[in-house]
Image (cartoon, helix red, strand yellow):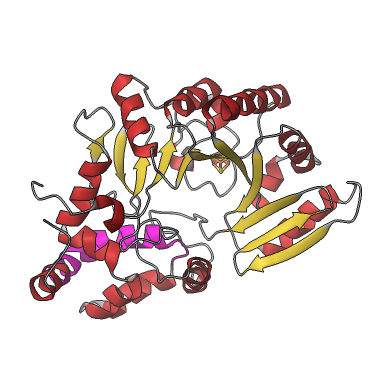
């Protein structure tokens, strides 16, 4: 790790930082992708953790605060994390919104104050899909929208973990139909819609993240190829690991901080692990590791489909893809099964291509 990449700023795009602060949740959605991981583990904040969050968030495309549970179960921790984030950063909270109304109301009030104090661009992203709908009382999404949009500074988005467009549209149109003015549903792309009136516009993202059993997603298998093409159209670049919205030569790192203190790269958790209390860890060390580890560099720089077509196990990897609907989880599985083969491809390419990522 001694050789550092030249010109980090131009070589790497901006990082995307996920902070999964807790694994606590008792809502009990039928599908929950983390249901076998729920407990009472919360991220421990100390001076080293705060410094790391400050370092990683400085210049980040987005900091996403979520959990393997419901982050609003730990509102004080959410705010502690927020205070460590660099001024002017875009921050997103992912929540079910299914918490007591007094807690939600107070949280939005404090969030609004923090947005002003730290000059943060804060978005609340509320999960909407058939499983959350089954747990949410009638009218919740309209009530959330009214509260958040009246806050002044907090933005609101909805997110479905399934491409189950009809269910989401029906519930939201029903709830918002009593709002003043005409309600419109618009498609913005294959994986984005919005619900709007003359008074507001709320974007809705459709993902392919449903879980149905083990480390690999099986529900809705076969959706992955469509989902990848939607992502590629949205970002105007072919799918690799990393933050696709970066326009730089190499995508920015997708960094994940887990509630148990493990730090890794999204999709590469089986090959790379740091600790949140490692005083030497910072963005530069992560960039150096990506740059100097052939397997990781390849997955950040070569389109996933090209990687798959270039190894001997193409057909077996396709079997995984056809049963998947989350590209990052598919990569996690592919790397754990075929990592050696991909590493060999990476070493060959580096040997023959005059690698330019190091000084
Ligand atoms: S609210 Fe989220 S974390 Fe909780 S059970 Fe539902 S999907 Fe899982």
Question: In which of the image's four quarters is ligand 1 placed?
Answer: top right
Residue at left offset 20%, top offset 42%: 285
> Considering only vertical position in the picture, is 40 above or below 121?
above
> Considering only vertical position in the picture, is 338 above or below 272?
below
Residue 77 picture location, percent across and down: 48, 23
Would you say 4 lies left or right of 89 here?
left
Would you say 220 lies left or right of 39 here?
right
Instruction: Say whether residue 325 is magenta.
Output: yes
Residue at left offset 23%, top offset 79%: 310
Magenta extent? 324-345
The secondary structure making up most of the magenta span is helix
Residue 327 picture location, percent across and down: 41, 63
Residue at left offset 19%, top offset 49%: 288
> Considering only vertical position in the picture, is 124 above or below 229?
above
Quadrant position of residue 267: bottom left
Looking at the rendering, in which quadrant would you find the C terminus?
Answer: bottom left
Q: Nearer the viewer, residue 244 or 125?
A: 244
Instruction: Say whether residue 227 is magenta.
Output: no
Residue 309 picture location, percent across and down: 28, 80
Q: Nearer the viewer, residue 53 or 276?
A: 53
Residue 36 picture location, percent across and down: 44, 41
Residue 63 in sight: yes
Residue 260 in sight: no
Q: Nearer the viewer, residue 292 or 61?
A: 61
């Amino acid at each position: 790790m001694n050789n550092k990449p030249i010109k980090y700023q131009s070589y790497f795009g901006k990082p995307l930082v996920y902070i999964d602060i807790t694994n606590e949740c008792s809502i009990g959605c039928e599908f929950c992708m983390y249901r076998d991981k729920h407990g009472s583990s919360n991220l421990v904040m100390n001076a080293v953790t705060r410094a790391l969050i400050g370092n990683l968030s400085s210049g980040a495309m987005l900091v996403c605060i979520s959990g393997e549970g419901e982050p609003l179960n730990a509102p004080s921790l959410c705010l502690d994390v927020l205070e460590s984030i660099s001024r002017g950063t875009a921050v997103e909270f992912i929540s079910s919104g299914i918490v007591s109304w007094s807690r939600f109301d107070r949280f939005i009030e404090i969030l609004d104050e923090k947005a002003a104090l730290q000059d943060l661009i804060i978005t609340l992203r509320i999960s909407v899909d058939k499983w959350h709908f089954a747990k949410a009382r009638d009218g919740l999404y309209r009530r959330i929208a009214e509260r958040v949009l009246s806050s002044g500074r907090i933005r609101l988005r909805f997110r479905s973990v399934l491409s189950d467009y009809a269910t989401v549209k029906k519930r939201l149109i029903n709830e918002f139909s009593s709002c003043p003015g005409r309600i419109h549903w618009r498609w913005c792309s294959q994986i984005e819609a919005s619900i709007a009136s003359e008074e507001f516009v709320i974007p809705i993202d459709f993902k392919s993240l449903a879980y149905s059993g083990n480390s690999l997603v099986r529900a809705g298998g076969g959706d992955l190829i469509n989902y990848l093409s939607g992502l590629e159209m949205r970002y105007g670049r072919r799918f690799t690991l990393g933050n696709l919205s970066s326009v730089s030569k190499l995508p920015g790192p997708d960094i994940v901080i887990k509630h148990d203190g493990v730090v890794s790269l999204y999709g590469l958790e089986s090959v790379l692990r740091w600790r949140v209390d490692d005083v030497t860890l910072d963005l530069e060390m992560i960039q150096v590791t990506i740059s100097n580890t052939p397997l990781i560099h390849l997955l950040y720089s070569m389109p996933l489909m090209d990687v798959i077509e270039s190894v001997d196990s193409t057909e077996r990897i396709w079997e995984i893809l056809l049963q998947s609907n989350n590209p990052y989880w598919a990569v996690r599985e592919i790397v754990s099964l075929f990592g050696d083969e991909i590493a060999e491809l990476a070493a060959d390419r580096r040997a023959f291509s005059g690698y330019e990522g190091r000084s």
